[in-house]
Image (cartoon, rainbow, N blue to C red):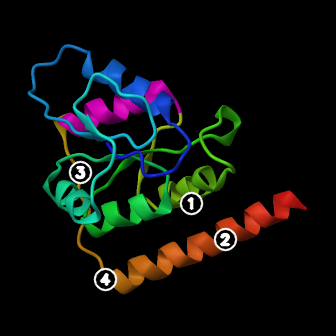
Amino acid sequence: MSLGTDLHPFDRAIEWFDTWIEKPRTQKVEVLVQRGYSKAGTAPAVEYLAFNDFVRELEEADIVVTHGGPGSIVECRRAGKLPIVIPRDPTLGEHIDNHQQLFCERMAAAGQILVARTESDFQELLDDMVLNPQTLPPQDQRHVDTTVRRVGQIVDRLVAGRRR
């Protein structure tokens, strides 16, 4: 799980993950949490990973959980992963605005990510992914970059319109 480098703690994601980790299961699951400024949970964690280490962990992972940061999602996509994404919620003090929520809705609608909007969603998505890890076919990187740039422009316009 990667919670990015934002200064806002994302303790809700840690709590959801801790609840999932503590459930009994027959499959052996190895996890690593890059928690940033979030509190330490029960899973093995580091505060930050160097970029190359982050990319290596993504490539080696069967399942990726991340916050809704566009950069994190793009790296997951480059690694061919279909990430489970928990967007940060500014009303809970997890970010300064709702750009992650807007970006994630667009990416989910395009089938590029799986969004966990509630803890129940998260638990179900992660349980399903453990039984059947999903990856995405390699894509032309220009297509990914163009799509992400376009979605970013749309999100910028939406956020700017709400500020007025």
Vertical position of residue 130 compared to residue 133: above or below: above
In the picture of the structure, the residue carrying the numbered disc 4 is 140
Q: Which residue is drawn at 34% across and 65% down?
A: 75
At horizontal 23% and vertical 51% (from top left) the residue drawn is 134
Graded by Cα atoms within 10 Å as few (under 14), some (14 to 19) or many (20 or more), the crowding at tag 2 reads some
Q: Give the range drawn in magenta.
A: 118-130
Q: Tell me which numbered mark, 4 or 1, is placed earlier along the sequence.
A: 1
Residues marked 2 and 1 touching at CB (< 8 Å): yes
State the residue at coordinates (54%, 47%).
Answer: 7
Q: Which of marks 4 and 2 is nearer the N terminus?
A: 4
Tell me the kind of residue under disc 4. Answer: Asp
Q: Is the magenta stretch mostly helix, strand or loop?
A: helix
Label 3 – label 2 distance at C-alpha:
28 Å
Mark 4, other Cα within 10 Å: few <14 / some 14–19 / many ≥20: few
Which residue in the protein does label 1 denote?
A: 106
Q: Does the magenta stretch include residue 124?
A: yes
